[in-house]
Image: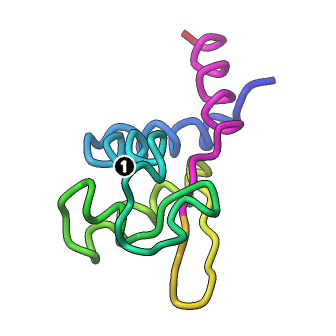
Amino acid sequence: MTAAPTSLNQTLHAIADPTRRRILQALKQRGAGSSSTPSAGKHGGLCAGDIEERVHLSQPTISHHMGILTKAGLVDAMKQGQWRWYKRNEKALRRLVKSLRAQL
């Protein structure tokens, strides 16, 4: 089972940016030493403020990148109150690797 070409193109575009790869790496190491909220990591991910701290970019820039990663299906977002929690979509990442192996 391989991803549709447009889906693969969208996913490759999302991970082509080094900042988005740093965000995915931060989400991989989710929750360790998070200081934004006492319950960080409770949802298995990071809130936007945690990502901002780890990647050292402004909130609007983080929102832009998270929108691209979410639209590509690589990140799941969950809104809880005023917080938005993000976690990696490991299933989608595995499909991406499988698709690349099949097509290259």
Residue 23 drawn at (x, y percent)? 36, 49
Here the colouring is rainbow
Quarter the C terminus occupies:
top right
Residue at the spot 51% in from the left edge and 38% down from the top edge:
9
SS class of the residue under badge 1?
A: helix
| Left or right: 99 in relation to 60 | right
Front-most of residues 87 and 34? 34
Residue 69 drawn at (x, y percent)? 48, 54
Amino acid carrying label 1: it is Ile
| Left or right: 73 in relation to 11 | right
Residue at the spot 66% in from the left edge and 27% down from the top edge:
94
| Left or right: 41 in relation to 94 | left
Quarter the N terminus occupies:
top right
Front-most of residues 53 and 37? 37
Front-most of residues 67 and 22? 22
Instruction: Count the numbered circles shown.
Output: 1
- Rendered position, 21 above or below 68: above
Instruction: Name the residue carrying label 1.
Output: 23
Residue at the spot 25% in from the left edge and 63% down from the top edge:
53
Instruction: Say few, some or many: other residues with alpha carbon within 10 Å of mark 1 (under 14 / 14 to 19 / 20 or more).
Output: many
- Rendered position, 69 above or below 48: above
Which stretch did the figure color magenta?
Answer: 86-103
Secondary structure mainly formed by the magenta segment: helix
Residue 74 drawn at (x, y percent)? 57, 47
Task: Give the residue furthest to the right.
Answer: 1
Residue 16 drawn at (x, y percent)? 34, 37
